[in-house]
Structure formats: structure tokens, C-alpha cells
Image (cartoon, rainbow, N blue to C red):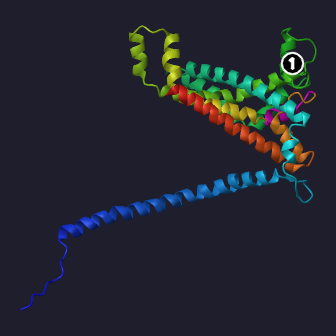
Amino acid sequence: MTTVISPRREQPAEEASRRTVRRPRRRQTRRAWLGIAYASPTAVMVALFFLVPLVLVGWMSLHKWPLLAPPTFNAPDNFADIGDNELVRSATWFTVKYTVVITVLLFAVSLGLALLVQHRRPGVGFFRTAFFLPMAVGFASASLLFLGLLSDEIGPISDLLRAVGLVDGYVSWTSGSANSALGSAVVLVLWRFAGFNMLILLTGLQAIPPEIYEAARVDGASRWQTFRRITLPLLRPTIALVLTLMVTGSLLAFDQFWILTRGGPDNSTTSLVMVIYREAFIRLDLGSAAGISVVLLGVLIVFNVIQLGVLRRRSS
């Protein structure tokens, strides 16, 4: 007599466990595709308006590219000519000097304003709004506003200073001398961006737990000790962000000098971005402008990486 062995059927518990394993996988797959769908518009925008122009600039830097003529390959002439360009050398020195001056002053003013309005008290909301309000004005509009205020013909600043006896006659703030032209741009940038950086630093200050300050007061720490040993160390990530924005914005300065000083007097306030603009749209040499742009981009990347690395190492 033969015995027929029927195929083994899975127990209901085993089937249920397999179903429970499949469901999370399906959910993860759906969530992954949903995330890709949400990220796709941003990825397309980044590719179109960042990656494609970046590749095009790199390609242009390898060619002699007149604005109204076909390009010809000439690598690496565009990069070799940068060192022989006297205007590039003077603009580089001026841009570095301007970056150091504006970074130190802007950080000091912004941090001072943030500490001033850190705690809640009557009227502090008004001062926070007043300090941040200049950010509502476009940078080009703010530059034109300062150009009118500092004008030696129609501006009220010279008349006010003459009325109190600080100056005699007309003073050309934007084109009289290199120092006055640089000072005018520095005042403009401080007025325009101090409130914005104050807001970022204020956010970092308010993220520090109040219990730490209370413990420091109980231990008898002075205000300077509290600021140096508690506020600054815990504020380092925010300081890293602010300094990166300041340095990057200063190295890419254009509007304030193009509108206020036109690079004068005698190209003493010509920034690197102004040189790129002149190479592209005045000398009509897009290849040379692209070469300078690629070098400037490389310097920005290296500088920001070093800066963030140093600040993070100190904070760890």
C-alpha cells in the first residue's frame, strides 16, 4: 500500500509574518518614489540654473570666446593671462583688503546689536525691527540711495557737516579719494546687512539654554567670563555660518562699488567681480571673464572649506 504525501501547507502564522514583512518594503518603496517626486522639481532647477551654467563657464574658460564671433580653443591661455593682468592684481589686493575690513566691522556691529536686543524688555521688539528694516531695501536701491545722500551737489550729508563746522566746502565722498570711496561702501554695507546678520546671531543666542547662564551666575562668573566661556563657544556654529556669508559676499562685491564709485578713483575701488564684468561686457572677451570666474570660484571653495573646518575643530 503506497502512501501519498501531500505538499506541506504553510501555517497561517507563517503567511501572516511574510505579509507583514512585505508591507513595510512596499511602504518604503512608495515613500522613496514619493520623495523622488518631491525632490525632482528642485533637482531640475538646480541642474538648469547652477550645474549647466557652471559647466558652461568651465568650457568657456578654455576658449577664446568673443561676444560676437565663434569661439576657438586656446587653453590654458586664459588662465596664464590672469597673472599678467595688472588690473586683476590690483583688484585682488583691494578685494582682500575690503573683505578683511568689512568682515571685522560687520561682525562686530552685528554681534553687538544681537547682544543688545537679546533679552526681552519693553521696546526691544521695536529695535529688532528697526535694525532689520534696511534688509527690505534692495541692494542696488540702497546703493543709489547712498549715492544721492553722499552726493557733493545734492546730498544732505555734506550740507549737514558744513553746518556743524566739520568740513569746509564740498566733499566728494565717493570719488574724492580711495579711502573716502572705500569708507562710503563700508558704511553702506554696514547699514544694509548688520540687521540681517544680527538676526542670525540672535537666533543662535536664543538657542543657548538659560540654565547655563544661571549656573554661571551662581558660581560667581562675571559678564565677561560668561561671554567668553559660554556665549562664544556655544555660538561657534552660528558664527561659522555668519562669517562664511560675510566673506563670500565680500569677495563677490559688485553693486556697491559699481553704483557708488564706478571703481574709482583710478581703479582704486575696482573689485574682482567688476574686472569680470569689464572683461565680458566692455572688452567683449567672455573666455577671459570665465577664466577669472573659475579661479575666483576655486578660491571661494577652498577658503570656505578651510574656514568651516577650523571653526568646527575649535567647537569640538
Compared to residue 165, the image places residue 14 above or below, namely below
Residue 130 image position (x, y, % from top left)? 63, 26
Residue at 84%, 42% in the rendered image: 276
Residue 273 image position (x, y, % from top left)? 81, 38
Residue 293 within the magenta-colored segment of the rendering: no
Q: Amino acid at mark 1?
A: Ser
Compare residues 192 and 40 and report the one nearer the observer.
Answer: 40
Residue 154 image position (x, y, % from top left)? 89, 26
Please give left or right for residue 102 compared with residue 70 in the image: left
Range shown magenta = 254-265
Compare residues 290 and 163 and report the one nearer the observer.
Answer: 290
Compare residues 208 and 229 and report the one nearer the observer.
Answer: 229
Please give left or right for residue 65 compared with residue 246 in the image: right
Residue 292 image position (x, y, % from top left)? 81, 42
Residue 260 within the magenta-colored segment of the rendering: yes
Look at the image and tell me whether residue 43 can be seen. yes
Image quadrant where residue 98 sits: top right
| Residue topped by disc 1 | 158
Residue at 88%, 44% in the rendered image: 279
Q: Secondary structure at mark 1?
A: helix
